[in-house]
Image (cartoon, helix red, strand yellow):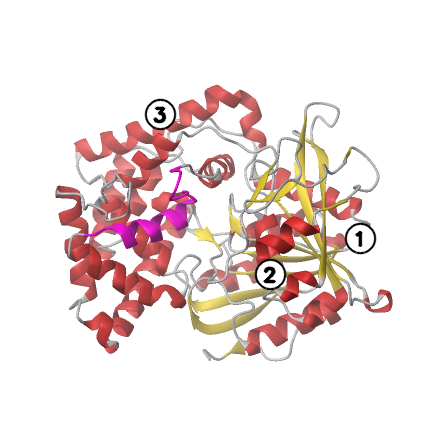
């Protein structure tokens, strides 16, 4: 499980996000700023029949790089339950990005990408990477983005109302107390029961193992004999699961921002809380060196006091039409969101300064972007729904009030900003029945060398997990980046050159570390 933050503390974040893609009634790919494309053809066997969706993606990305690309979209039909291949089916939405300058003689296949979450859109990630990946990569690979089962355009899980999401993200219960635990348990239990009532046993099929099997079908249906894969954050868990299930079907795999595959869930949760706390200290040190931010005073004291005061008297927003008020829970989410990328530290400093002066507009902007909430309509995407389903189905953690009480006392003392939130999040799956789909081992005997990339000061996926994942795979090779924020590729020249060389040559790079700059 992740920090409550609303349990989505393991998505890759970028200062250059991809366009948001919605779906038309016909099921075609439609970036939110454009009209519908022709409907792609679904196929239950053989290759996917892709249809052109270039106009929509070029309009949404809106730069010269996108104009040099062809975008095609398709839907793959997969079994809901692979143990019952002739039973119910669901759709997986796929986009393929092809650089028109690519020479057939240089082509190595496709590069599959996943942004993490679980619950984030691989379609949007592929669109965002159009402007970030080098010509060297596109000269050898088509880019394949897919929304994992239950996400976005792929038969989405939708069982949490916008009102529930508003209430859940705003809560900040003191789960050291009986009343606080009761409040947190009540909110999570109601959400769990609603999801189970809507989907019943089918809800259990939205898990990492089944998603890895979907990815192998997509690989086969796109004509690749071997998989090339780039997975961020939770995408490292998906990639490790694929490697365990299909080790000989991998050509290359880059796992950036590793999730720990061996440490007990409670220990991993605590390490993540510590990761965010340490990242905040880095932000605070930087803030005090910048005059525009240093006017805050001590950032840790400011945030701690702001959380408490916002819980007592939630903060108004100056945004037109905004009726919400920011609680301490919203402040925590906003702070966590900005710690994913150093490029947002300035925005965080300004948001905190405004909040101390009575305006939560910028705090809401950070939190809403993190949670997938449209600031104009108040409607959320289904990131939280899918995240809950996959995390709960993968988890085997047994939670009691006594456990939460003990961890709340320990973690709140050790991690004053994020510890209470982490303890409250232990209730996320309190009324979720066992799925029967626990995560398989990450071991991948027979796989080729797999590149595991770790950021030394990563808040969401602490660096210690990098070596643990590499060791568990048995074929993992560590590449470290002495930088800040969540995930590393393609943020620096050193990391980028090593990862690109590995993808193209299938040979792990010489040298296993990169400097901060």
User: In the structure shown, which secondary structural element does the residue marked by tag 3 occupy?
Assistant: helix
Using the image as rendered, state which of residue 498 and residue 449 is in the foreground. Answer: 498
Considering every residue shown, the one lying at the far right of the view is: 105
- Looking at the image, do the residues carrying marks 3 and 1 touch, with CB atoms under 8 Å apart? no
Q: Is the residue marked by circle 1 packed among few (<14), some (14-19), or many (20+) residues within 10 Å?
A: some
Q: Residue at x 75, y 68 (%)?
A: 139
Image mark for residue 129 = 2
Q: Is the residue marked by circle 3 packed among few (<14), some (14-19), or many (20+) residues within 10 Å?
A: some
Whole-Å distance between the Cαs marked 2 and 1?
Answer: 21 Å
Q: Residue at x 20, y 40 (%)?
A: 174
Q: Earlier in the sequence, mark 2 or mark 1?
A: 2
264 above or below 84? below
Q: Which residue in the structure is indicated by mark 3?
A: 190
Locate the N terminus and report the quarter of the image it occupies. Answer: top left
Give how far across and how far down residue 324 sits, in percent. 25, 39
User: In the structure shown, which secondary structural element does the residue marked by tag 1 occupy?
Assistant: loop
Can residue 83 be seen at all in this image of the molecule? yes
Instruction: Please provide the residue range marked out in magenta.
Output: 359-378
The reply to whether the magenta stretch includes residue 364 is yes
Q: Which residue in the structure is indicated by mark 1?
A: 224
Using the image as rendered, state which of residue 309 and residue 501 is in the foreground. Answer: 309
């Amino acid at each position: 499980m992740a920090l409550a933050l609303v349990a989505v503390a393991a998505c890759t974040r970028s200062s250059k996000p991809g366009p948001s893609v919605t779906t038309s009634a016909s099921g075609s790919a439609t970036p939110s700023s454009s009209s519908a494309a022709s409907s792609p053809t679904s196929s239950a066997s053989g290759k996917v029949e892709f249809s052109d969706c270039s106009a929509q993606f070029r309009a949404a990305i809106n730069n010269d790089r996108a104009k040099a690309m062809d975008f095609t979209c398709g839907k793959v039909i997969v079994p809901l339950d692979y143990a019952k291949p002739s039973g119910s089916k669901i759709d997986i939405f796929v986009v393929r990005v092809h650089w028109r300058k690519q020479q057939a003689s240089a082509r190595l296949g496709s590069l599959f990408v996943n942004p993490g979450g679980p619950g984030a859109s691989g379609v949007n990630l592929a669109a965002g990477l159009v402007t970030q990946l080098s010509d060297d990569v596109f000269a050898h690979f088509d880019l394949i983005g897919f929304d994992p089962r239950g996400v976005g355009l792929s038969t989405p899980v939708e069982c949490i109302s916008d009102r529930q999401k508003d209430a859940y993200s705003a809560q900040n219960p003191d789960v050291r107390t009986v009343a606080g635990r009761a409040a947190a348990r009540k909110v999570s239990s109601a959400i769990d029961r609603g999801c189970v009532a809507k989907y019943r046993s089918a809800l259990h099929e939205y898990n990492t193992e089944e998603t890895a099997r979907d990815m192998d079908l997509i690989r086969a249906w796109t004509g690749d004999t071997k998989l090339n894969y780039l997975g961020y954050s939770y995408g490292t868990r998906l990639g490790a699961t694929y490697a365990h299930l299909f080790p000989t079907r991998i050509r290359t795999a880059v796992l950036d921002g590793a999730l720990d595959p061996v440490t007990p869930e409670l220990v991993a949760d605590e390490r993540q809380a510590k990761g965010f706390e340490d990242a905040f200290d880095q932000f605070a040190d930087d803030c005090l060196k910048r005059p525009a931010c240093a006017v805050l005073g001590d950032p840790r004291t400011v945030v701690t006091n702001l959380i408490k005061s916002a819980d007592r008297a939630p903060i108004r927003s100056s945004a037109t039409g905004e009726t919400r008020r920011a609680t301490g829970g919203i402040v925590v989410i906003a702070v966590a969101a900005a710690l994913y990328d150093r490029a947002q530290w300035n925005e965080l400093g300004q948001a905190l300064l405004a909040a101390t002066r009575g305006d939560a507009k910028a705090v809401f902007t950070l939190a809403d972007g993190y949670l997938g909430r449209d600031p104009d309509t108040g409607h959320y995407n289904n990131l939280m729904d899918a995240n809950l389903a996959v995390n709960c189905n993968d988890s085997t953690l047994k939670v009691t009030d006594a456990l939460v009480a003990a961890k709340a006392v320990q973690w709140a003392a050790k991690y004053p900003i994020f510890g209470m939130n982490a303890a409250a999040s232990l209730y996320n799956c309190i009324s979720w029945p066992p799925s029967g789909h626990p995560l398989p081992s990450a071991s991948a005997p027979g796989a080729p060398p797999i590149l595991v990339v770790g950021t030394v000061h990563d808040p969401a996926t602490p660096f210690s997990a990098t070596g643990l994942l590499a060791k568990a795979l048995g074929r993992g090779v560590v590449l470290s980046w002495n930088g800040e924020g969540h995930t590393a590729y393609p943020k620096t020249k050193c990391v980028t050159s090593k990862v690109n060389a590995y993808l193209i040559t299938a040979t792990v790079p010489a040298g296993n570390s990169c400097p901060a700059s």
